Image: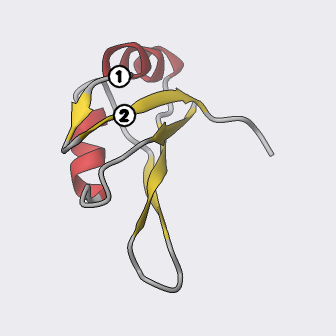
Amino acid sequence: MKLLIRNLDRLTTEKELKKLFQEFGIVQSCDLVIDKVTGESKGFGFVEMPRPGDAKAAMSNLNNQTVGANKIRVKKAEEK
């Protein structure tokens, strides 16, 4: 299941994000969206977890949690 994480502190790294979600299970991929011009985080990213139960646990436990200076929002990513 692919999750969308919004409102990330711009200083949060992919490594930190992955570690946060690994507490709930296997993380298949973790990608921060980076601005091509500045090279800085755009404040959101995606985490993919192969087991839906783990992803749902991460979603319910991490949504509205403070990470860095911001309260993050976690929801299921919409398919393109």
Q: Residue furthest right?
A: 80
x and y, in percent, of residue 18 in the image: 29, 46
**How many numbered marks are there?**
2
Give the residue drawn at x 32%, y 15%.
61
User: SS at mark 2?
Assistant: loop
Q: What residue type is disc 1 on?
A: Asn
x and y, in percent, of residue 35 in the image: 50, 74
Q: Is residue 6 left or right of residue 64?
A: right
Tell whether label 1 touches label 2 (CB within 8 Å): yes
Give the residue drawn at x 26%, y 59%.
13
Q: Is residue 50 left or right of residue 71?
A: right
Give the residue drawn at x 80%, y 46%.
80
x and y, in percent, of residue 49 in the image: 47, 34
* Residue that numbered label 2 is attached to: 72
Q: What residue type is disc 2 on?
A: Ile
Kindly indicate the quadrant of the structure image that contains residue 20. top left
Task: Determine the CA span between mark 2 and mark 1.
Answer: 5 Å
Q: Is residue 76 visible?
A: yes
Above or below 28: residue 56: above
Picture quarter with the N terminus = top right
Nearer-N-terminus badge (2/1): 1
- Near mark 2 (Cα within 10 A), the count class, few <14, some 14-19 or many ≥20, is some
